[in-house]
Image (spheres, rainbow, N blue to C red):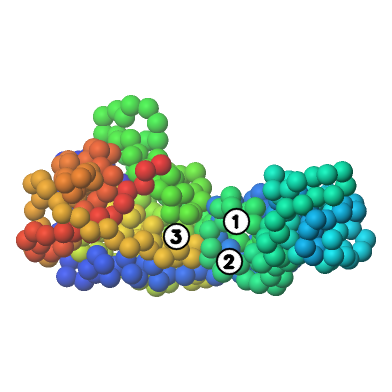
Amino acid sequence: MTVLSHTRPESAAGPADLPWDRARRMAAAATLPLVAAEVPLRAAHGRRLAAALRALVALPGADVAAMDGYAVAGPGPWHVVGDVLAGGVPFPRELGPGEAVEIATGAPVPLGAVCVVPYEKTKQAGLSIDGRCEPGRHIRRRGENVSEGEVVLTSGALVTPAVLGLAAGLGHDTLWVRPRPVVSVLVTGDEVISSGVPGAGLVRDAVGPMLAPLIAWADGEALPPRHLPDGAEVLEAALGEPGADVVVVCGASSKGPADHLRGVLGRLGAAVLVDGVAVRPGHPQALARLPGGRLVVGLPGNPFAALAAALTLLAPVLRALDGRPEPEGELSAITGPVRAHPRDTRLVPVWRSARGAIAVGHDQPGSLRGAAMADALAVIPPGWEGGPVELLALPAR
């Protein structure tokens, strides 16, 4: 059952709950046999390479001019015997001493040329020029940037606009990339509505709209949220449907009479990896692997508790499937009325400032007000008595 009222407290954590940092490590270690895909360059942007990027050609592919001017051989003055344009026909013979060809940037330098003298560095008299030649100057040698067959990026690299340009320059029309894990979002609860102002006894779903951008931020692809009534049978049927690599169940993860997730996972023969986390809010969360490999993440129904649980288990799972390591924690001093729990980690909404992190309050499990005002969650260890704490970044867009 999805509970969205901020007045209902979370149930007490149990002795089997995993420490928060260990639960995150277990989530980051969860893997799936996702199949890489070869896609056109335009479709690879924002993905991660599934194979090393090798140069199909050298860059540059020949000795080329780095400036507009004259390619010259031997000491000056030089007699101009022709010209070479970028993309044009290479000069047909080797230059002899005292000869020069007019040349454009990017055009192949003739054999025998020792340098390129830019226009502005020359003195002209008819078909003769003079100037200063520094051997090798303004000539880009074949393969000086990238040699043919060289590995320029390793598997797992993010495909940025610059990477697309580099791949094209190296002769690639397609790239092998890792697919985004597809995530199905199941929001449970007879009392939950997805639009409009809720009437008596009903509540608006505040978790489903939050998860799609969070999933995208963590490099997953969210399917439209589905709303399920309470009941073990309908939940079991939904978990068995194909089409997703990861299934997120919102609500039904606690131990009340309408919380069926754990019983359904048992009947399906799932391997439960995490069954409760010693964290507030969000301790009734779960991570399991169904037969066949699909992962199930169980989130509490309270909105802030669901957000905390999603950052604890769901985001590390999706980053791991995308080949991304967890970002290193940022440490900061914290000010404001912050209390530690004697046994559990606390996740507290904060706003970063020049003075350190400032607690913004409104951190009840059922309220997203504090999280909406914050840009990070401060990780308050059990029994904390002051000092710097880790900051967990909140999705900004």
Where is the C terminus found, in terms of image quarters? top left
Circle 1 crowding by C-alpha within 10 Å: few under 14, some 14–19, many from 20: some
Residue 58 in the figure: left or right of residue 388: right
Q: Is residue 224 above or below residue 243?
A: above
Q: Mark 3 or mark 2, which is nearer the start of the sequence?
A: 2
Callouts 1 and 2 close, C-beta under 8 Å: yes
How far separated are the C-alphas under marks 1 and 2? 9 Å
Question: Which residue, as the protein is rendered here, is positioned at the far right?
Answer: 92
Tell me residue 329's x, y (percent).
29, 61
Q: Nearer the viewer, residue 329 or 277?
A: 329
Callouts 2 and 3 close, C-beta under 8 Å: no
Callouts 3 and 1 close, C-beta under 8 Å: no
Q: Mark 1 or mark 3, which is nearer the start of the sequence?
A: 1
Tell me residue 164's x, y (percent).
63, 53
Tell me residue 86's x, y (percent).
81, 50
Disc 1 is placed on an element classified as helix
Residue at numbered disc 3: 318
Q: Nearer the viewer, residue 187 or 183?
A: 183
Query: Which residue is found at the position 64% from the left and 64% from the top?
Result: 145
Tell me residue 388's x, y (percent).
16, 59
Residue at numbered disc 2: 153
Query: Which residue is found at the position 77% from the left and 52% from the top?
Result: 130
Q: Mark 2 or mark 1, which is nearer the start of the sequence?
A: 2
Residue 254 in the figure: left or right of residue 105: left
Residue at numbered disc 1: 163
Q: Nearer the viewer, residue 54 or 391?
A: 54
Which of the numbered marks, if any, corresponds to residue 319? none
Disc 3 is placed on an element classified as helix
Give, as a three-letter code, the residue at label 3: Leu
Disc 2 is placed on an element classified as strand
* Count of marks, rendered view: 3
Give, as a three-letter code, the residue at label 1: Val
